[in-house]
Amino acid sequence: MAEVMLAAKVAALNQSDANAWIIGSAGTSAAEGIMATPFARRVMTARGLDLEPHRSRGVTASLLESADLILTMTRNHREALCIEFPQFDHRIHLLSELINQTFDIEDPVGGSEEDYRLCADEMEQIIEKGFGRIAAWAA
């Protein structure tokens, strides 16, 4: 969900700036090729965003190598990535750090549609408030 919300934010930029961004997502324990859950798709559709093309993928060294910035949802994810890929630890940050805080955003998988909506609300607020920091960190 964060991927499509950030992509929408970037698309709102002028076209030359937006074309400079490549946004992706991957999971620390994701199975390959799985569609987003029906709840996630409905929550994003209600925001005018499309998750239908999304397919899960796992984190790889080559994916991290190509990234200027790596945002994680939880401290455990950040720690796991820093341990497995220490060469990229300077690029790995918690999403909540965008707003100068340190807290986890729990994965709503297995929860209700309301859990997905609340998670999306939280991520959207962080992306809105912290977008300037994303641009600075990715530079």
Image (tube, rainbow, N blue to C red):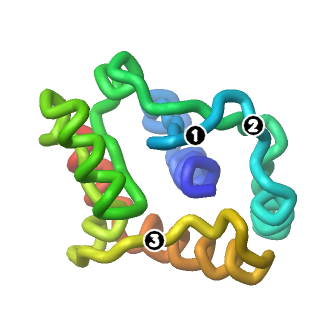
Which circle, 1 or 3, is nearer the viewer?
A: 1
Q: In this view, does 28 lie above or below 5?
A: above
Counting the numbered discs, the total is 3
Q: Is residue 71 above or below residue 75?
A: above
Between marks 1 and 2, how big is the CA–CA gap? Answer: 8 Å
Q: Point out the tag, 3 or 2, that comes first from the N-terminus.
A: 2
Residue 105: mark: 3
Q: Which amino acid does label 1 sit on?
A: Ala
Q: Pointers 1 and 2 in contact (CB under 8 A)?
A: yes
Q: Point out the tag, 1 or 3, that comes first from the N-terminus.
A: 1
SS assignment at label 2:
loop
Q: Is residue 108 above or below residue 24?
A: below
x and y percentages locating residue 52 in the rendered image: 83, 43
For disc 1, the marked residue is: 30
Residue in the picture at 28% in, 41% down = 81
Would you say 7 lies left or right of 97 here?
Answer: right
x and y percentages locating residue 51 in the rendered image: 77, 47
Would you say 135 lies left or right of 119 here?
Answer: left
For disc 2, the marked residue is: 34
x and y percentages locating residue 12 in the rendered image: 58, 52
